[in-house]
Image (cartoon, rainbow, N blue to C red):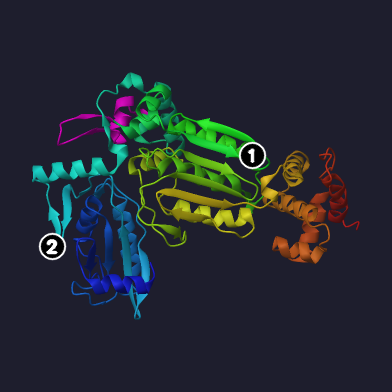
């Protein structure tokens, strides 16, 4: 949100989807009532630092950090907002005054604030907790708007896979040894994850579409959603058809596994150090992509989801219930959870980040993986993501083989007295020389971020421990020999 757009919202005044709070030194007590009512109605804009009449008073700079911290903490606290949610307040300056902007999505769930249900109308926030008719209509509206909440009263426990429940217990324990799902029964997990619901209008109750998609047997999923599939395609040589394909029609947990296996099969994992630790750029990018294509998707749409690897890009497409149209700026947009129940489930098992943070990480690592290019998000009835990859990253190349060999060699042959940090630096230097054989010692030191003297002393000291034997017989083998000589100061 840029300041000019926000000025327009403020000028139009408060209404069904717009609310102002002054909050000069601290949060107004009723801020969370408004957040709850917006979640339960149509979403909208909450601006802190503005009076009811639209006068921008601003938030005191000294109070701003604590206000932001209190907001984020409370919105993630089920004792305050239940179910909790992730919303990142955006700091914006208007005419020299600081305001906080909250973009509240419409939720698929009915939310409570301090145990009370609030709804929104033109006059403000209404407490409807004790109005059974209003609460019933609220549940009806949610279930008709978000297909993941659709109830299937004839689905039974025997239609779900018991082995997946045991796997989920192991996954949540890996994330948090004290996670409550780790000791719950299958039925308790389903209830805790909101995969069993009741329709307050019709009286129907049962397992939801989200439950079937996450735990259902393949034949049950196909019976309920015959159009459901995720098509993973490699298209580099045969552009009319494909070079490889995986037609995925199983539960979302194993669909994620198969997408990541397809990625590992066809996209390399180049060497990258972050704070002296090797991380996988490929996995950091495509874990988020695989989760997004499964989580943020309209499953009643007949359009099959697609994951296509091409020569210089990876494209994903999936059916969508759009909140806008056109290219999205990933650095400042607030993603709308298309299936919040499924999204929360993926977060609990460690396969999704908080909304917003995952997109920012995807943006960050794609730039590194692709040589500076950005991911594109295109909103519409079909949501499309384009992840650029370099030509080097789309083929099985020598660097990956050399890197793997270097890591194994250094681990096996470098003295135990050499620190892990120095070993990492040695690997990085060797790879730099392999990729840039023409660089002199000063240029190599600059790329490593150390002084030339320190580089020479450290690396010459540990080079004697490394035995360059058994390098892969590729074109890079001869550069490895030159590399050994450079590290030992022979050239």
Label 2 Cα crowd, 10 Å radius (few <14 / some 14-19 / many 20+):
few
Residue 187 located within the stretch drawn in magenta: yes
Picture mark count: 2
* Farthest-out residue, right: 490
Question: Which secondary structure, mark 2?
Answer: loop
Where is residue 461 shown, x and y percent of the image? 81, 53
In the depicted view, which residue is nearer to us: 314 or 160? 314
**Which range is magenta?**
183-207
Question: Which secondary structure, mark 1?
Answer: helix
Where is residue 272 shown, x and y percent of the image? 65, 51
* Residue 276, visible in the rendered structure: no
Quadrant hosting residue 161:
top left
Where is residue 185 shown, x and y percent of the image? 32, 25
| Residue plotted at (69% across, 51% down) | 391
Would you name the residue on which mark 2 appears? Answer: 123
Q: What is the distance, in whole Å, between disc 1 and disc 2 at their CAs?
A: 56 Å
Horizontal side of 405 relative to 232 (left or right) equals right
In the depicted view, which residue is nearer to us: 293 or 51? 293
* Farthest-out residue, front: 240
* 438 is higher (above) or lower (below) than 344: below
| Residue plotted at (51% across, 54% down) | 361
Residue 413 located within the stretch drawn in magenta: no
Label 1 Cα crowd, 10 Å radius (few <14 / some 14-19 / many 20+):
some
Would you name the residue on which mark 1 appears? Answer: 266
* Residue 387, visible in the rendered structure: yes
Question: Which label was assigned to residue 84?
Answer: none
């Amino acid at each position: 949100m840029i300041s000019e757009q926000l000025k327009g919202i403020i000028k139009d005044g408060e209404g069904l989807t717009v609310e102002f709070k002054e909050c000069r030194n601290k949060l107004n007590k009723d801020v969370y009532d408004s957040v709850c009512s917006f979640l339960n109605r149509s979403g909208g804009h909450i601006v802190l630092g503005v009076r009811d009449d639209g006068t921008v008073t601003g938030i005191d700079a000294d109070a701003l950090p604590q206000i932001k911290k209190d907001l984020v903490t409370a919105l993630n606290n089920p004792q305050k907002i239940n179910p909790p949610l992730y919303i990142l307040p955006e700091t914006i300056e208007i005419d020299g005054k600081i305001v906080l902007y909250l973009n509240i999505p419409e939720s698929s769930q009915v939310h409570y604030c301090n145990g009370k249900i609030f709804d929104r109308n033109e006059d403000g926030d209404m407490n409807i907790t004790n109005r059974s008719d209003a609460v019933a209509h609220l549940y009806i509206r949610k279930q008709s708007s978000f297909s993941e909440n659709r109830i299937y009263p004839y689905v039974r426990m025997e239609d779900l896979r018991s082995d997946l429940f045991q796997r989920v217990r192991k996954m949540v324990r890996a994330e948090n040894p004290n996670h409550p799902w780790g000791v719950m029964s299958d039925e308790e997990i389903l209830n805790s994850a909101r995969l069993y619901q009741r329709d307050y209008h019709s009286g129907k109750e049962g397992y939801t579409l989200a439950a079937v998609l996450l735990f259902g047997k393949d034949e049950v999923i196909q019976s309920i959603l015959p159009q459901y599939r995720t098509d993973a395609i490699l298209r580099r040589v045969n552009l009319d058809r494909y070079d490889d394909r995986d037609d995925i029609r199983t539960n979302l947990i194993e669909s994620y596994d198969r997408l990541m296996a397809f990625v590992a099969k066809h996209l390399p994992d180049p060497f990258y150090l972050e704070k002296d630790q090797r991380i996988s750029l490929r996995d950091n990018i495509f874990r988020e992509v695989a989760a997004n294509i499964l989580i943020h998707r309209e499953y009643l749409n007949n359009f099959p989801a697609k994951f296509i690897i091409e020569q210089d890009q990876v494209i994903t497409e999936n059916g969508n219930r759009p909140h806008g149209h056109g290219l999205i700026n990933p650095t400042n947009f607030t993603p709308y959870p298309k299936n919040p129940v499924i999204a929360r489930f993926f977060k609990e098992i460690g396969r999704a980040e908080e909304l917003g943070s995952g997109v920012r990480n995807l943006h960050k690592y794609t730039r590194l993986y692709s040589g500076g290019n950005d991911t594109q998000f295109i909103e519409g009835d079909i949501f499309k993501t384009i992840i650029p990859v370099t030509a080097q990253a789309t083929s099985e190349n020598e660097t990956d083989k050399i890197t793997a060999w270097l890591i194994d060699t250094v681990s096996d042959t470098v003295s135990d007295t050499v620190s892990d940090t120095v070993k990492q630096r040695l690997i990085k230097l060797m790879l730099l020389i392999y990729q840039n054989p023409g660089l002199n010692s000063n240029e190599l030191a600059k790329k490593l971020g150390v002084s030339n003297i320190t580089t020479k002393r450290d690396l010459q000291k540990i080079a004697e421990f490394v035995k360059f034997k058994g390098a892969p017989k590729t074109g890079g083998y001869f550069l490895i020999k030159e590399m050994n000589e450079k590290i030992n100061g022979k050239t």
